[in-house]
Image: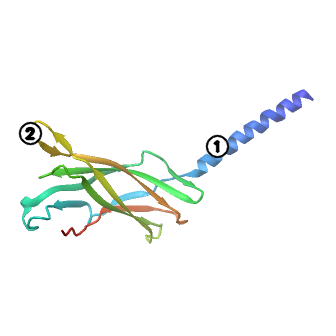
Amino acid sequence: MKKFLLIFIILSTVNCAQTSDKNKENNNFLCPSVYFSSQHSSYVKIDNNLSESDLENIIFKAKFNNFAFNKKCTNKNMIKKIPIDILITIEDFKLNKSDVELPLFAFLYDKNEIIIDKQYFLITKKPQFNAEDYSYSMDEIVERIEIITKDRSEISTIVIGFIKKNDSN
């Protein structure tokens, strides 16, 4: 009888462990394809106090370079989380101590190429100060955006781009 009880306890613990592992697997899903918008792949910041037509007034230019999924895409309680690490290169023209602000959009598409969600982000970073020549610089930004959606559709594609904003003072 003791052998039967021992076998029953061992089988039940093994079965419970396998069930919890299956639930963990079900929480992860294959991350969707990511593309950078060709029309919104660069962002140019111009000094608003000067004429916009003069190329000498450009403060910096940002471009998308690459992306990576360094964490898994998850679906828990009908909420999907998609963490995307983005590499943005910065071409510094007249960077000052002001924060570099980059407004982004992420459009989520289903398998029929229909937009199912739109999300907006603002990446803010401080430039590095160089004490030798009293200048500010920045070469790149690596930032994680986390897309969170309750949409029940399967997300097949994400398109990311810079938002063109009209700065007026």
SS label for mark 2: loop
> Are discs 1 and 2 less than 8 Å apart at CB?
no
* Residue wearing tag 1: 21
Q: Looking at this rendering, what residue extends furthest in the right direction? A: 1
* Image position of 45 (left or right of 34): left
Write down the quadrant of residue 115 in the picture. Answer: bottom left
Q: Residues within 10 Å of mark 2 (few under 14, many from 20)?
A: few
Q: Nearer the viewer, residue 145 or 20?
A: 145
Q: Is residue 91 above or below residue 21?
A: below
Amino acid type of the residue tagged 2 in the rendering: Asp
Q: Nearer the viewer, residue 118 or 10?
A: 118
Please give the name of the residue rendered at 33% of the width and 58% of the height, measured from the top-left corner: 122
Q: Quadrant of the C terminus?
A: bottom left
Place of residue 53 in the rendered image (x, y in percent of width and height, measured from the top left): 8, 68
Sequence-wise, the earlier of marks 1 and 2 is 1
* Residue wearing tag 2: 133
Q: Looking at this rendering, what residue extends furthest in the top direction? A: 2
Place of residue 164 in the rendered image (x, y in percent of width and height, measured from the top left): 25, 67
Q: Is residue 15 above or below residue 48?
A: above
Please give the name of the residue rendered at 43% of the width and 70% of the height, measured from the top-left corner: 113
Amino acid type of the residue tagged 1 in the rendering: Asp
Place of residue 135 in the rendered image (x, y in percent of width and height, measured from the top left): 12, 44
